[in-house]
Amino acid sequence: MTYSEFKNKVENGEFSCIYLLEGEDAYFRERGLALLKNHAIEQPELNYNVLFGEKVTDQEIISSLTAYPFMSPRRLTVVREYYPKKEGWMKEYFSNPVKESLLVIVNEKPCDLIKKMPNVQVVECGRADNSIIARWVKGTCAKANVDIDLQTARTVAEYCLSDMVRVDNETQKLISYALFKGQITQEDVDLLVNRDSEYKIYEMTDYIGQKKFDKAFTVVKELLNKGEPLQKLFVSVYNYFRTLLHVSLSELSDDKLAAMLSVPSFVIKKAKTQAKAFKKKSLKRVVDLMVETDYLVKSGVYDAEDRIWYDLFAVITA
């Protein structure tokens, strides 16, 4: 179920007994939980219980789920970051859940075991497409009587790597800045929206793919001028080109690739687009070079800074 479908059902008073809010975007996970808390129960101070997956026992979950709601049609039990390896208590309870009790499991990472259980409504809380986020930014600005065109709103999404927590914070910052003039421009976004090193790596890679080597090198200098350690930059570049190589060679799905490489799904989608700008041989050559550098630097054969600069030039002209 998409987040939009989930939101519409909850706002219309349609509830399931068991939800799995799953995905890397904390904004959607927390907003989804808030929706249920606001619409499904009354007296939350008496009918709302939060448990944590690392420490919780089966009996604690069952006790919370079977407690009768007080002055409310339902009781809400939340279990955060819960990744069971066996069905255990779930097999019986999920087959016949208590109707007056809502169970909400809030997970950042996938858990196939929970998804396979009966009566589970899985709500996708992954990062939204930039076009959808751009419309959200435009709508949020409009509510504050501030105008922003869709292309500029899309830039906000791109600079924030589609992370809705960051998009929300940066949008509020832009609204405050532009409140009196009534409009947010591209110049405002460039001035105010923070672009972290991960976005800069994407930006640099885009420039490399377009053969704009001068702009790629400018991005490297910007990162270093902002205090980004050279070795950290090297690791970021290596990890990203390693991802590009894997997505260019693999036939696995985005989710399986993301799990194998321990990265969010949106990174795979972005990498697939960028990998098309490179020949597979070029990607292999860059990754091999950086693996060799890692070994030679750790072995004391080369000075880290000198060798890393050599590799960065090799990457920029990949």
Image (cartoon, rainbow, N blue to C red):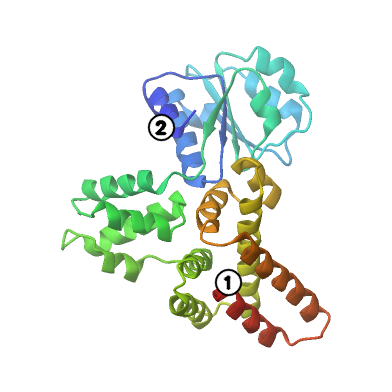
Query: What is the x, y in percent for residue 88?
Result: 78, 24
- Residue 66: x percent and y percent? 65, 18
Residue 229 seen by the camera = no
- At a point 73% along the width and 87% down the height, the residue shown is 303
Outermost residue, right side:
299
Residue at the spot 72% in from the left edge and 68% down from the top edge: 288
Q: Which residue is mark 2?
A: 4
Q: Which residue occupies the foreground of this view, 247 or 126?
A: 247
**Tags 1 and 2 touching, CB below 8 Å:** no
Tell me: residue 125, above or below residue 317. above
Q: The C terminus lies in which quarter of the figure?
A: bottom right
**Badge 2 element:** helix
User: Where, by quadrant of the figure, is residue 185 drawn?
Assistant: bottom left
Residue underneath mark 1: 318
Query: In this image, 250 relative to 44: left or right?
Result: right
| Relative horizontal placement of residue 129, taking residue 26 as reference (left or right) | left
